[in-house]
Image: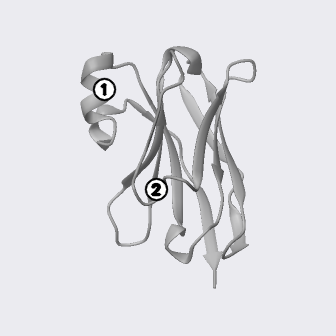
Amino acid sequence: QVQLVESGGGLVQAGGSLRLSCAASGLTVSTYYMGWFRQAPGKEREFVAAIIPSGGVTYYSDSVKGRFIISRDNNKNTVALQINSLKPEDTAVYYCAATRRNSLYYSRTYYETNVYDYWGQGTQVTVSS
């Protein structure tokens, strides 16, 4: 059974940092397209970052680019999201997701929730002013 388990969330002051981790079982992160999404109460789930299984090419939403870094640890079979310079608007539940789409297709749709096959249960990030 495929499982994605997020951890590392918490309560942080604005300007602080967090490092989220997604531990995968039942799949190998080095062969999957991995993404991070977030969802605030009453809001739609939105794309944050993604990394492809080969070459390490990454994608970021405009709102987080320059502050967030996605990375993969093949030995631990985990995907991390380093979050720096946190803002109150970053407050949300952060979800890890995985898919095995075609590279060309994925390059056009990585930001859409419906292209991902597997999802974790999320970890809460709260940023105070």
Residue identifier under label 1: 106
Q: Are marks 1 and 2 in contact (CB under 8 Å)?
A: no
User: Which kind of residue does numbered mark 2 sit on?
Assistant: Arg
Residue 93 in the figure: left or right of residue 115? right
User: Which kind of residue does numbered mark 1 sit on?
Assistant: Tyr
Q: Residue at x 68, y 58 (%)?
A: 9
**One can see residue 25 in this view:** yes
- Name which of mark 1 and mark 2 comes first in the sequence: 2
Residue 107: x percent and y percent? Answer: 30, 28
Q: How many marks?
A: 2
Looking at the picture, tell me which residue is in the foreground, 96 or 25. 96
The picture quadrant where one finds residue 23 is: top right
Q: Residue at x 60, y 62 (%)?
A: 124
Of the two numbered discs 1 and 2 in the rendering, the one whose residue sits closer to the viewer? 1
* Picture layout, residue 72 above or below residue 28: below
SS label for mark 1: helix
Q: Residue at x 37, y 55 (%)?
A: 46
Which residue lies most toward the front here? 66
Q: CA distance from mark 1 to mark 2?
A: 19 Å
Please state, as top left, top right, bottom left or bottom right, where the C terminus lies in the image.
Answer: bottom right
SS label for mark 2: strand
Residue 38 is tagged as 2
Residue 71 in the figure: left or right of residue 35? right
Residue 72 in the figure: left or right of residue 88? right
Looking at the picture, tell me which residue is in the foreground, 10 or 118. 10
Residue 41: x percent and y percent? Answer: 42, 71
